[in-house]
Amino acid sequence: MKTITVAATSVRNLIGQPAASIDNMKRWVEVVREKGAELILFPELNVSGYIPAPIAHEIAETIPGPSTEKIIKIADRHNVTICYGLIEKAADKFYCSHVLVNGSGIIGKQTKIHVPAHEKPFWDAGDAISTFDIGKAIIGITICRDSFFDEMTRTLYFKGAEIVLMPFGYYNVPRSRYLKETIHGMSLLKSSWTNGIYAVVCNSAEGREPNEWEPKGRIFPGWAGVISPWGRVIAFLEDEGNNEACVIEELTPDELEDRRSHPNFLAKELRPEVYQFQ
């Protein structure tokens, strides 16, 4: 790993308005690039909109596809790597996917592996976990609920991940001190500590009024942060008004190497011969 500056960007989530969503991405890319960001993470399904409803199939896109081509052009113009989410149509299946691109094209994509019950009627579970070399670091991606599975982050560690991008689409939940006072937040700290990885996290922001798919509307508590390989919160920002927010941090190899070289680093002491998963 080499020193790299990352941006975790919490942005609003619009249903089926990819052009408006990409325009908003472009605005944030310009803002964080001026501050030195080289790798920019956006939340779960930020391009297509997070909507577990029949309309999901109507707004799905192929990868590559029109939105991906636009975002590649943005990445090329600003010489940056961008990670974003959309509902993917692949043959006769649909996926909640996150895509990693730079100015040269698609670096890779990760599909959501652990799909919760309320999403299962609308998109399928992925069946492959991948890492991606972007030059300065090896990247893994865990989409929302995937981030809470120890098996997911441990697999990424064994596949060489140094930074794990964790985009979320959490909604209608308390936002106060998320990383320090909820079991979900604490599990992210634990994953970083046990695997010696940097975690870059961000959630969707703002809210949606009641509509035909969401009778009660939906509120996304905007937050974004970075966690060290020691499970230490390097930076965390949450907006009490659910507004868009962004964290920019420089990640160095020193802390990662320090954690992984510790004599009691847990990943060095695994005993697969005594574990049972079935």
Image (cartoon, rainbow, N blue to C red):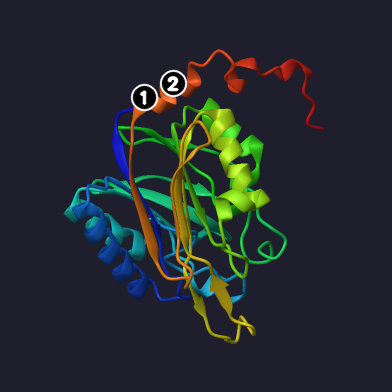
**Residue at screen point 56% across, 32% down:** 193
Specify the quadrant that holds the C terminus: top right
Residue 126 shows in the view: no
Q: Which amino acid type is shown beneath numbered disc 2?
A: Asp
Q: Which amino acid type is shown beneath numbered disc 1?
A: Asp
Q: Is 175 placed left or right of 9 in the picture? A: right
Q: Is residue 111 above or below residue 14?
A: above
Residue 121 shows in the view: yes
Q: Nearer the viewer, residue 160 or 95?
A: 160
Q: Nearer the viewer, residue 154 or 222?
A: 222
**Residue at screen point 51% across, 28% down:** 196
Q: Hey, which quadrant is residue 132 in on the image?
A: top left
The percent position of residue 10, horizontal first and vertical second, equals 42, 61
Q: Please give the residue where the numbered disc 1 appears in the rendered image.
A: 254
Q: Is residue 103 above or below residue 29?
A: above
Q: Is 107 placed left or right of 91 in the picture? A: left
Contact? badges 1 and 2 (CB < 8 Å): yes
Total numbered circles: 2
Q: Is 134 placed left or right of 162 in the picture? A: left
Q: Secondary structure at mark 1?
A: helix
> Mark 1, residues whose alpha carbon is within 10 Å: few (<14), some, or many (≥20)?
few
Specify the quadrant that holds the N terminus: top left
Q: Is 80 placed left or right of 245 in the picture? A: left
Distance from label 1 to label 2 (Cα)? 6 Å
Q: Please give the residue where the numbered disc 2 appears in the rendered image.
A: 258
The percent position of residue 168, horizontal first and vertical second, equals 53, 57
